[in-house]
Amino acid sequence: MAQVFVPTCVFVACQLVTGLCQAAWRPAAAGLVSSRGYRGDAPDDTRGDLIEIPLPPWEEKPGEPTDIKRRRLVYESRKRGMLENCILLSLFAKRYLNTMNENQLQQYDRLINEPSNDWDIYYWATEAQPTPEVYQGEVMDMLKEFTKNRNHEQRLDAPSLEYLEKESQ
């Protein structure tokens, strides 16, 4: 039988990987939960491992033509940080954006662009968490009602953009 030479560094690397994999599978009761793992909103979560990426502050765009604002908001409703909001907000935009007045458009713009965390918007819309006063208003009420999906529509994907071509004709 031939012997196979395994360099020491490969052997040590294999042991290290094996040890890490085994540690990852140990129960949390053993106290070996990685500090980088998701811990949720547990009462004892200090959020010390939370990394907040600074985003530029939201700025209102005074003087932006209404048709441009609507197009921008359609795009921003579709391109979210999480799929749930992409679907929810793009369907909401399809239904209501073309009927919103200037004040409602400004509320919607602030709502979807000022908070830096898409989960906050999702939790407010689903009423899992209370909406901060600054975002409370007519548009948030519309979004909360839309989120309830009382007609039991199938909402599995963002709408096709073909509806925009039909509206412009």
Image: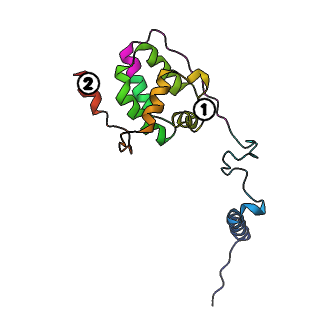
Tell me the residue that label 2 is attached to: 167
Quarter occupied by the C terminus: top left
Which residue is located at x 44 percent, y 27 percent? 142
Residue 130 has which mark?
1
Picture coordinates of residue 93, whole percent (x, y): 39, 29
Side of 142 relative to 123 (left or right): left
Q: Which residues are magenta?
A: 52-70
Picture coordinates of residue 63, whole percent (x, y): 45, 8
Which residue is located at x 40 percent, y 31 percent? 92
Please check the rendered image and state whether residue 134 is part of the magenta-colored stretch, yes or no.
Answer: no
Q: 89 above or below 153?
A: above
Tell me the crowding category of disc 2: few under 14, some 14 to 19, or many 20 or more residues within 10 angstroms, Cα based. Answer: few
Please check the rendered image and state whether residue 57 is part of the magenta-colored stretch, yes or no.
Answer: yes
Quarter occupied by the N terminus: bottom right
| Visible residue check, residue 61 | yes
Query: Label 1 to label 2, Cα distance in Å?
Result: 35 Å
Do the residues bearing badges 1 and 2 touch, measured as CB atoms within 8 Å?
no
Q: Nearer the viewer, residue 130 or 84?
A: 130
Q: 140 above or below 61?
A: below
| Residue at the far bottom in the pictured view | 1
